[in-house]
Image (cartoon, rainbow, N blue to C red):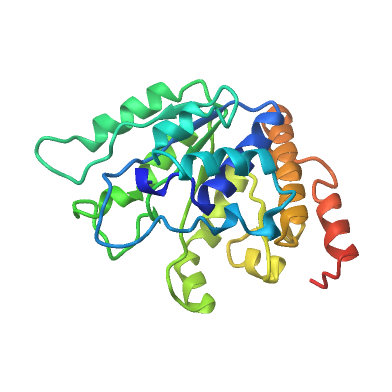
Amino acid sequence: MQNRYAGDVGDFGKFGLLKQLTSARLDIGVNWYLAPDESHNADGKHIGYITDTRYNGCDDSLRESLKEIVNGQRSVSALETMDLVPNAIYYHEVLYSPSRTFSRRDWHIKALDLLCSADIVFLDPDNGLLVKSVSIGSDKSNKYVFSNEIADYFTAGKSVIIYNHRCREQESVYLQRFDWMYEKSIRQKAKYGWEFIFLGANIDAVQTASRFGIAPDRAQNYHADSEGVELNFRVMSEAVATFRECATMPEGWNDEIQKDFKRRGGRK
């Protein structure tokens, strides 16, 4: 995350999801993975959703709040001040590139301590999960979340959501990047009782989920419009809340999404 991105369409999706999770009786913690602002490109300009009528009815109050930020001082501080997610805890220490004067490990430990009371921790790195082409010691590593950092949140009993950008590759090539998850997801489910849900729009969710070792009854297609996304967020929030309370997935967790998908012309 960078301050200049505050209020763009990505934030509309993030906060829409986090608001639904809060309504499902879950406490939210946000680690912005805040990187220093850059100026070499025009990123942060994805704000057309504010006036795009296709977003009408998909949390209009949230859209109005983000519009105010876009038209004012764009920063994570402005997002926090808006109180968009009730009672959320935010960690906004800047994550710098590796240097002799900056300890990423200390930065991470502070985040774990601040977010210790959250049920769900949302990680918002600039790009996403660390990729093979970027080393831990790279100047660009502050744009990524490391696997050991995610593991520390899991060890602390947190559910974790990670914002991850898809790189500019064909889908078949891109999905190969996650082949390693197949055996690992099956192993973690058997050993620790983890659950994985895969929700997909404009793809075959069941087929794609199978690449990650996710069972067909944990995969579901949905319509990528205001009605489908709102339903998607609500159902997923309820499923996560139930799993955290009862350690089991509710029967028919995806019934509402499935009915909506079929009712409005879905085939997969």
Q: Nearer the viewer, residue 267 or 245?
A: 267
Q: Nearer the viewer, residue 85 or 49?
A: 49
Q: Is residue 24 left or right of residue 15?
A: right
Where is residue 217 shown, x and y percent of the image? Answer: 77, 57
Tell me which residue sits at (51%, 20%) in the image: 117
Asked whether the viewer can see residue 163, the reply is: yes
Vertical order, 202 against 213 (above or below): below
Where is residue 212 shown, x and y percent of the image? Answer: 58, 62
Vertical order, 184 against 106 (above or below): below
Where is residue 110 shown, x and y percent of the image? Answer: 32, 25
Tell me which residue sits at (49%, 51%) in the image: 8
Tell me which residue sits at (70%, 71%) in the image: 204
Count of numbered badges drawn on the protein = 0
Vertical order, 41 against 249 (above or below): below
> Residue reaching furthest front?
71
Q: Nearer the viewer, residue 106 or 33?
A: 33
> Residue reaching furthest left?
100
Asked whether the viewer can see residue 194, the reply is: no
Vertical order, 183 against 152 (above or below): below
The C terminus: image quadrant:
bottom right
Q: Is residue 80 left or right of residue 86?
A: left
Tell me which residue sits at (75%, 37%) in the image: 238
Where is residue 257 shown, x and y percent of the image? Answer: 81, 54
Q: Nearer the viewer, residue 210 or 123?
A: 123
